[in-house]
Amino acid sequence: MLTDIEIASSVTPRPITEIAAKLGIDDDRLECYGRYKAKVTGRGGKKGRVVLVTAINPTPAGEGKTTVSIGLADGMAKLGKNVCLALREPSLGPVFGIKGGATGGGYAQVVPMDDINLHFNGDFHAITAANNLLSAMIDNHIFQGNALHIKEVTHRRALDLNDRSLRNVECGIGYNERPDHFDITAACEVMAVFCLARDFADLKKRLGDIVVGVDEEGRDVTARMLKADEAMAILLKEAVKPNLVQTLEGTPAFVHGGPFANIAHGCNSIIATRAAMSYADYVVTEAGFGADLGAEKFLDIKCRAAGIQPSCVVVVATVRGLKYGGGVPKQDTGKPNLEALKAGAPNLFKHVENITGVYKLPCVVAINRFVTDTDEEIEYLRAECGARGAEVCLADVWARGGEGGTELASAVIGHMDAYEGEMEYAYPLTAPIKEKIELVARRIYGADGVDYTEEAERALSRFAADPACRDLPVCIAKTQYSLSDDQTRLGRPTGFRITVRELYRRAGAGFLVAVTGKILLMPGLGKTPAAENMTIDPDTMEIKGLF
């Protein structure tokens, strides 16, 4: 069996100018990075509709959300539709860690997969540099006399790698000592600002709004007050242009920005999504991890910021993953076991009910099929999801590419073309902060309520008294493995409460972050990181082991 990178290497991509031409993008708006990648400036004249792809809570048995997204777009193209993907950029942390790459799999991939999974066009590096320039200017300001009377620094440094040793550090040893912390770049505020900005002017404003700390009187100190915002914007002037690539079958794909969904808002950039909508009739986009994280944040945060809404939501599931959630060990998930499937399937049902019941959107369940799935198992899911208002389609895109996605594509197109409703949100922006968090916990997770640490309560009181915070959405940092904040509680847990241990404001991004459970903003590497199994041939420069 060929690996993903071997499959990708076996296909010669089309010149990116040909891919751009499919969308009506002329050469004047195309800045090529070699033959197969480009950045795009400007917008088209279309008003394309969006389908959001999300999933069940992830398991070691796999779900394949990005793979299905790509296969769905290729399937739409096979049906003659003008379609474009809008995906997130991979982070080097997971690429060299446990998760691996994020460009799809099998015959449903975006290419060049090695470039996209590594440095790509330099966007992540630019975001890291802009974030750390701000850190440097904060510390220099304090060193040079601290005219702003900064008492506490809240802005954190960033690095696009998993490095647990950087979670807590001491900086300025010998002259201006203070504790500091690193976030992975995908979790830093500059990444959130980058992905929620509507255009470059909005990006500049949001960068200036970033709160870096408080002064001796408890007032916010911002990047604008440090005069750092313009320089940060300069570092991002090329990165802000969305990247155009293609699938193995030549379907156009914008890949741009990449915040994590467990510790950030988990969506690609608004700039790329709106660009795709301006060039294509149908846009396939995804949000990270399960629907309790990525989809919730896409719908409650990104849609509000971008002024968009999806016309259909696809929830990706695997029979194997649901069996794992039902208590079956990973090595046994390929064996027929209807009872285990029934035990794990309520996780899927909860996500479906959230989409149809809370957000009032059409929902299609995509079963990313494995050869070990039985007809009995598939029919059970078809009947149970149908009873909850969701059509079930099989996706065989890993093995067959777009041809294996036409059933799903046809169903999604039908729902999108028929939908004329208005999406609802999980909470109103005007609700008190506590109520917003409570509504997400109860309505989306199924929790009985929310508890707060003393530290979180103090922050809550401070933000509740600040008029600038009252109408902000909430971004809840939570484990991706469970609907609860306890990663060991699989399936559809009941009788649990969420604990908020930290609450802070992301003024540039325009949301409040509630950190729950044991979630960390800087992941660590596993016992055997993927990096250990990667090789590169010095003569051919061929990479092996990259997913």
Image: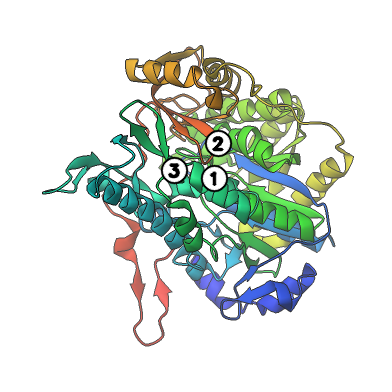
- The image's mark for residue 510 is 2
Q: Earlier in the sequence, mark 1 or mark 2?
A: 1
In the image, which is nearer the foreground, mark 1 or mark 3?
1
Q: Earlier in the sequence, mark 3 or mark 2?
A: 3
Q: Is residue 526 visible?
A: no
In the image, which is nearer the foreground, mark 3 or mark 2?
2
Q: Which residue is mark 3?
A: 60
Image quadrant occupied by the C terminus = bottom left
Q: Secondary structure at mark 2?
A: loop
- Residue 228: x %, y % from top left: 42, 52
- The image's mark for residue 206 is 1
Q: What's the CA distance linking mark 1 and mark 3?
A: 37 Å
Q: Earlier in the sequence, mark 1 or mark 3?
A: 3
- Residue 150: x %, y % from top left: 31, 37
Q: Evaluate if marks 1 and 2 touch, with contact meaning CB atoms under 8 Å apart.
A: yes
Identity of the residue furthest to the bottom in this view: 539
Residue under the point 76% across and 31% down = 423
Q: What's the CA distance linking mark 3 and mark 2?
A: 33 Å
Amino acid residing under circle 2: Gly
- Residue 243 sits in which quadrant? bottom right
Residue under the point 31% across and 53% down = 136
